[in-house]
Amino acid sequence: MTGKRSLTTYGIAFLFILALNFFLPRMMPGDPLMAIYGDEALVAMTPALKAQLVTRFALDQPLWQQFAAYISTLFRGDMGWSYFYNTSVLKVILGSLPWTLLVVGTSLVLATLLGIVLGIESGWRRGSRTDRALLTGLMSLNGFPDFFLGLVLLIVFGVLLGVAPLSGALTPYSGLSGLGLLLDVLKHMALPVAALTAAYLAGGYLLTRNTMITVLKSPFMTTARAKGLSQKALKYRHAGRNSMLPVLTMTGIWLGRVVTGALFVELVFAYPGVGQLTYQALLARDYPVIQGVFLMVAISVLVVNFAVDLLYPRLDPRVSYAR
């Protein structure tokens, strides 16, 4: 019953995202095709292409038929046509999406795991020199935006030390394959991942540390100590496991922030991900691509939140009973 209710909630959110993505351009004054594609695109379009787009999106039909056509085309994988790249929007986005997923996924996992581990250790040693050093350092780091950290890393490791590439995701014309190609990809993604991880590490750390301090005062921890359990079991199996639950809950919310941060970090490192694609689409006023990126990001955040919602009761069965 709980799973069905949760699925219904996310289904409603998904429909809301689709409706928002559909109605926003059509709420603009003027011709819907002009609102979706922009004046410059319409000038460059041939009359045949205009007629094809009007038919595809049912722009000459009532609004409800346009929405039905929009949903139908989306489920067929048709997100529109990019006049700047002269190909389908889905193909354009899928060409850049794997690079962004690689950076965002790695950063999110590293920031979450490091935040949990450091938060557990810091909360366990509350008031110690280690705790004060971690708290001061990560709070200071949290004050800098992700793109600024990216610029600092780029200048230090790319320009001054020369140990990291300045741009791109691959070395041009290298002809690498196998292990050499993998190492080249890791080398290019190291600084973007480091910038995003450093920018979002403090959030997980602070949440885990504060939860850890609260959990250590709980009655079940007193009982666990009375049983003579080892320090490791007390720290990680009992206190740590309960301290990481709020962090997992926040992971889905953080994903949206990390993706947004990745868009700016990719510009700093000229990384060929969705951020670079969005920037080029903005410069070219390629509205279908921008619209498609918004839809993909929103759905990704929704999917991750749903996955976390399913995982949470497995870590803490009390959540299932509370529902």
Image (cartoon, rainbow, N blue to C red):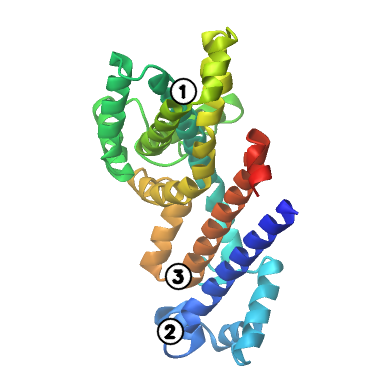
178 with respect to 144 (left or right): right
Q: What is the C-alpha distance between the residues marked 3 and 1? A: 54 Å
Percent across and percent down for residue 43 are 44, 84
Q: What is the C-alpha distance between the residues marked 2 and 3? A: 16 Å
Residues under numbered marks 3 and 1 in contact, where contact means CB atoms less than 8 Å apart: no
Residue corresponding to mark 3 = 286
Q: Amino acid at mark 2?
A: Met
Give whichever of 289, 210 is nearer the camera: 210
Residue corresponding to mark 2 = 28
Q: Quadrant of residue 48?
A: bottom right
Query: Counting residues from the N terminus, which is met first, the one under dot 2 or under dot 3?
Result: 2
Give whichever of 300, 88 is nearer the camera: 300
Query: Counting residues from the N terminus, which is met first, the one under dot 3 or under dot 1?
Result: 1
Q: Amino acid at mark 3?
A: Asp
Residue corresponding to mark 1 = 216
Query: Counting residues from the N terminus, which is met first, the one under dot 1 or under dot 2?
Result: 2
